[in-house]
Amino acid sequence: MKNPMFSHEMTRRGLLKSGMAMTAAGLILPAGMAMAQTEPKKGGVFRAGIGHGSSTDGYDPGLWDNLYAQTFAAARHNQLIEVSADGALVPEIAESWESADGITWTFKIRQGVSFHSGKPVTADDAVASLNHHRGDASTSAAKPFFDAVTDIKVDGQSVVVTLSAANADFPYLMSDYHLPVMPGADGKIDPTSTDGCGGYVVDSYEPGVQATLNRNPNYWKSDRAHFDQIVLLSILDPAARLNALMTGEVDVIDQVDPATIGLLEARGVAKILSVSGNAHYVFTMDARAAPYNDNNVRLALKYAFDRQELVDKILAGHGSVANDNPIGPASRYYFAEMEAKTYDPDKAKFHLKQAGMDKLEVTLSAANAAFSGAVDAAVLMSEKAAAAGITITVDRVPDDGYFDNVWMKKPFCASYWGGRAVEDQMFTIAYQTGAAWNESFWSNAKFDTLLIAARSELDEAKRREMYQEMQQIVSFEGSTIIPMYNNYVMALANTVATPDKVANNWNLDGFRAVERWWFA
Amino acid sequence: MNDIWRMIGQRLLFGLLTLFVISVVIFGATELLPGDLARELLGQSATEETLAALRDQLGLNDPAPLRYWNWLTAALQGDFGVSMATKRPIADLVGARLGNTLFLALYAAALSVPISLTLGVLAALWRNSIFDRASNALALTAISIPEFFVAYILVLFLAQSGLFPSMVRITGSTTFGDQLYMSFLPALTLTLVVTAHMMRMTRAAIINLLANPYIEMARLKGMSPLRVVLRHAVPNALAPIINVVALNLAYLITGVVVVEVVFVYPGLGQLMVDAVTNRDIAVVQAIALIFASAYVLLNLIADVLSTISNPRLMHRS
Amino acid sequence: MQILLAVIIGLALFFAIGLASRATLRGLAPAHLVPTFRDMPLTASFGLAVILIYVVVSVLAPVLAPFGESEVMGAQYLPWAAPYHLGTDKLGRDMLTRLIYGARNTVGIAFATTALAFVVGTVLGIWAALVGGWLDQTLSRIVDALMAIPALIFSLLLLTIFGTSVLSLILVIAAVDATRVYRLARSVAQGIVVMDYIEAARLRGEGMWRLIRREILPNAMAPLVAEFGLRFCFVFLAISALSFLGLGIKPPTADWGSMVRENATLITFGDVTPLLPAGAIALLTVAVNFVVDWQLHRASGLKE
């Protein structure tokens, strides 16, 4: 069998190689420390208790917005490209991909793979799957990814995507969880169908309650999807998840309540799996509105609270301090040497004075819908800020409708980012001037110029330099307070075995726990 | 007796009116909530463009009165429509969960009504005894603890030891016996939550009557205290007791969302909260009407029974 | 063993507090009230003492509390040792301080809410029973319609629309509670209005308000008072349940219902932290209802 990685490397031009060199800072084991890798065993019924899921969840890939829907999707679908546990792109339904100029991308579709229904996977299916997210009538949350796509067409066994401008990181977008390959008919996919080409076939599904899936006997990956059956349970209450794990009703739970991590470890009934990634908690300030339109006020707030305290108390240490930088330590170009901001009331006062103020009174809107512990984090910030002459009134708003009513409406509020694999994606969707999700309405001409330039920069060293400069600008001139990167914290029954390296791009091994893990 | 039948007919008519009013209130309140289904489905990922496309697809751009009228005309023909979020027929979505909800409510009622009535009568009989005070204090303690916390404590003692499962997983192959076993902890939680209320009402209603001359008379005739309470006090105290039982039964059907969440019990409460959160109005309406019907019927039964128990009331209606 | 010890200590405290408060009350009471307090059962004197203690703590909270209400002192979940006698909560605030301020906020809100619900519910309920006819029908149907919407979901809708300030919280919970009080008051009053003495009072030409206040209310008092004792503690529960759904009282204000919710997960591991606020609520509930029972007993006119 042809080594897909090798053929892939061979066909790529030097300028695009940088995209493949990405490694994760998160969980790398020292070289040579080869763990006694137990060989994955087949069999067993794997039950996962997931802290999301709603009775209104559906099968439409454009609307998957919670960890339950995403994990359920990863169990039954494959995508063009998979993100491996160490953060590299690896071929899935696209056997290889190449581009000569970063504008025209060719994805070669793997032959011999079939959907659960028995229909072979073709390039037409892949095009239909991508087109579901394009066009005026599309209702997909992934629609903005395709803004720069001018054409998608079939060329023999390949899919050819044409962009309006070069983008070295385009393949990363194709690994997004919204974009599974589903069977197409007349150029359209059926968004109410469960059919996919993934490792498990849906047996039953009750939205917001549970899904049962059986192993796909014809799965093309022979070394994946080890369980005979998987059951995905939606358990919203953190204490109920803990109890389910401790009483043996489930084998793994996600989103362990930080307050209980230590107690659970002491019990010895489960292993804690804490994976650091790029996900981060955010407090955004509306850069158009006074007083946040003055960068000195923003800096004063950035120096007025204790980041380490938040990591200790909100995350129980399962995370790391962030320096108002949305590019996390798991990223290629993470700027680790940037000047750190510590709790410094005097510096905060200095910046207030620069802004012509003695004291500052602001209201911070938060709900735990933004991120778990957002209200507590806001309370802690408010307590510390008092010493700098800053009064932060915490306005706890209802969870219900938070992202409609508060987010991007109130001038100072909490938000959350799952962390993006590529710097360009993170910056483009949330920091570029006028971007749809530019939640702080921040605009910086120098940043925008650098962002466009870096996308097609050939030289690796120069590219790194440009991305680090952008991080510096966002951190010290941006309108976003990013106090910490949160780990994905899961608890596993002692019988569950995982590979040495667990992916840090998303929860539950990048949603792939169901096909990467096994029972020891 | 004709009076009773007339009253039932009248009340059923009013019940229908109540349902209509509720459908308007719920529709209006859901409309008043910030955001809509499109917004909630897309969540943080929403952009104006995708929102517009989704609203168009879901028919959310029609004016509210028109959408209500469309819903009402369909509902009057027995068609409650499909969930806008999942496209599943409402009957399909609600059916199984309604069964689960009624099962849990009846289970908890079967435990709590006999317990609380017995305890209430005994407490009235042995008023001010150690038994009275202790059962009272225990019931009050149980009722003053939030129900999710009662559930956690029960799980700590009864599930972590392996006696009962900590969550309820009902599948197609679950037998009745299994369901009874699995649902024991949620039913017990609810029993603890509602018992104190019914027990105290029973006790208070009976004691309230004990100073009446006819009770004194019965006692002077040498009747045993138990017989006095059962023969003379209980029948006259029935009206408030029936009312409080009806209230609690209705609560067991409509108000148990927190217990459902803690035990992962697939009932209507969780479905309704999800539907409200997502502004899936068709589902909200259907469940609100089910809950309302339960209320109306239980209250009607309570009123009929109270009226029968107190013949003097009959002459007024 | 520990449980047994706790029960013994609890009972000892109960008797000590009960006896001490009965003796004190008897000593301090004006002459005409002395017999009342002399015949008071131990449970009632215990209840009165606890309520008094809660009131004193509520009023003097800023004096009694060792630290500020929302002051972050140190690490989270510190053990029970001086100066944090009950440890710290998950943000590192002194637990004892939070409990003391919690008394003030929680009891105040619960009392205001219940009182409001009872005034509105009772007056309307008795009025409806007394007048009957279309007024009774209209009010009862409106209340039926409101009650037919589950309380928690109704509160959730209203609070999402009107915001979660303390005032809207009080009004929303009181509105929901008042419907329940109305139903009870009406059904109790219905049993009374058919009595002969009401007919007689009507024939004497007594006004509506006087009928309600002088003739019906005193005779409907017992079940209403019993209901008051429970409704009072239901307010704590409502706040706690709302905080389960992400509403409830806004931080950093300390209230017991939310404190139970915040720390509830710890009980899974047998940690007693969440039992402190839960215990505070339970103790107050039991105390209030002990006093209610005593009043009920006195009102019933039974001599034993």
Image (cartoon, coloured by chain):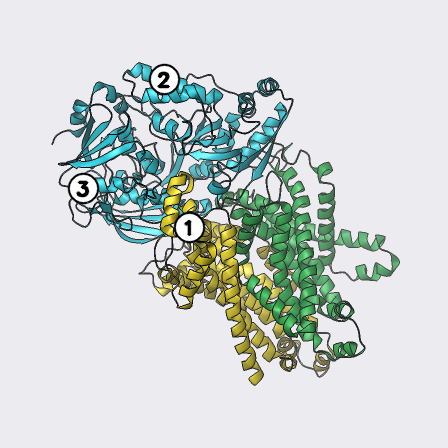
Chain colours: A cyan, B yellow, C green
- Residue A182, horizontal then vertical, whole percent: 23, 44
Q: Is residue C41 above or below residue A246?
A: below
Q: Residue furthest right?
A: C31
Determine which residue is flagged by label 3.
A124
Q: Nearer the viewer, residue C256 or C218?
A: C218
Query: Distance of mark 3 from mark 2, alpha carbons?
Result: 38 Å
Q: Chain of mark 1?
A: B
Task: Look at the image and tell me in which quarter the C terminus of chain A lies.
Answer: top left
Q: Which of the two discs, 3 and 2, labels the residue nearer the N terminus?
A: 3
Query: Distance of mark 3 from mark 1, alpha carbons?
Result: 34 Å
Q: Amino acid at mark 3?
A: Asp
Q: Amino acid at mark 1?
A: Asn
- The nearer-to-camera label among 1 and 2 is 1
Who's the residue at 26% across and 25% down the image?
A34
Determine which residue is flagged by label 2.
A466
**Image-based side of A322 in relation to C78, left or right:** left
- Identify the secondary structure beneath mark 3: helix
Q: Amino acid at mark 2?
A: Met
- Identify the secondary structure beneath mark 1: loop
Q: Are marks 3 and 1 in contact (CB under 8 Å)?
A: no
Q: Residues within 10 Å of mark 1 (few under 14, many from 20)?
A: few
Q: How many marks?
A: 3
Who's the residue at 42% across and 42% down the image?
B43
Q: Nearer the viewer, residue B220 or C292?
A: C292
Determine which residue is flagged by label 1.
B61
Q: Are marks 3 and 2 on the same chain?
A: yes
Who's the residue at 15% across and 45% down the image?
A120
- The nearer-to-camera label among 3 and 2 is 3
Tell me where residue C177 sits by quadrant. Answer: bottom right
Q: Are marks 1 and 2 on the same chain?
A: no
Q: Is residue A245 above or below residue A343?
A: below
**Image-based side of B301 in relation to C289, left or right:** left
